[in-house]
Image (cartoon, grey):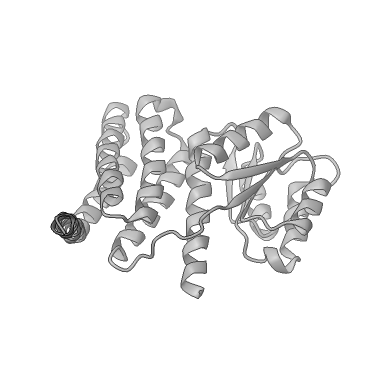
Amino acid sequence: APAAPAQSDEDAFQADQRRQFLASVPQFSQAIRDLHQTFLKTEERTAKIAAVGELYRHIHALTGGAGLVGADVIARISAAYEALLKEMHDKPGTINISTTRTSTQTLFFISALLEKAATLPRLTSFDPIVLAVDDEEISRRAVMLSIEKAGVRGIACENGGTAFQKAREARFDLIVLDVDMPGMNGYELCTKLRALPNYKDTPVIFVTSLSDFQSRARSTLSGANDLIAKPFVFVELSVKALSYLLKAQLALQRAL
């Protein structure tokens, strides 16, 4: 009997924290969008780094707040984005076209999640598996490390033929491909995967040294969703991979 009021108080505290979190969402969402615009528009190096730092502090607060009220989808992607912003702030050399683009994509995703914060489902049975394909051992290890940093499992293959066979035998939730590989290259593998019923909508990210406009256009035509240029920042791939996996998971849960 004495334990019942304590439980009730805890529930009331959680409910109050959630109300406060949801009430702060519109103002907070606008604040991070404004900070990101400042980052994008600022050319002077010191001011740009300062803008990244201020955005990092806001996202750090979001990670803690979302975790406290049980908004686990927001907390998960916010924590990964926080790590990317910290890397960009502490190592300004990592601020480039690719990381800026990934930052923008992630902020848009978080903003969309915040708009639906009151109705977002909890993550259920979220245990995705990523297939990483690259003929270079160092690149494979870098991709696998990035996947592990995202908190998900990964399996590596060194050529397109083996990867295609594995994809036919098991179901992967995300594919990370190199382009320039002997035998079946990344474009060919992506096209063949898209022909399989289970992989029509599976996210595919190319990680390649071929980052010119023609290569980007060809990656899109082959069915890829995104592209990161080598050498890449590990945590950038972590954020990008997690974003696609969470989007797919939310779409699946809504369909159930």
> Which residue is found at the position 19% from the left and 61% from the top?
15
> Which residue is found at the position 60% from the left and 57% from the top?
203
The image quadrant of residue 195 is: bottom right
Considering every residue shown, the one lying at the far right of the view is 183
Q: Where 256 falls versus 54 (above or below)?
A: below
Q: Where 139 falls versus 215 (above or below)?
A: above
Could you say where residue 211 lies in the image, as x and y percent from the top left? Answer: 62, 42
> Which residue is found at the position 64% from the left and 56% from the top?
224
Front residue of this view, candidates 214 and 222: 222
How many badges with numbers are in the image? Answer: 0
Considering every residue shown, the one lying at the far bottom of the view is 255
Q: Is residue 58 left or right of residue 149?
A: left
Could you say where residue 207 lies in the image, as x and y percent from the top left? Answer: 63, 42
Q: Is residue 68 left or right of residue 193?
A: left
Front residue of this view, candidates 127 and 133: 127
Front residue of this view, candidates 240 and 77: 77
Q: Is residue 195 left or right of residue 121?
A: right
Considering every residue shown, the one lying at the far front of the view is 1
Q: Which corner quadrant holds the N terminus?
A: bottom left
Could you say where residue 80 lies in the image, as x and y percent from the top left? Answer: 42, 42
> Which residue is found at the position 51% from the left and 74% from the top?
256
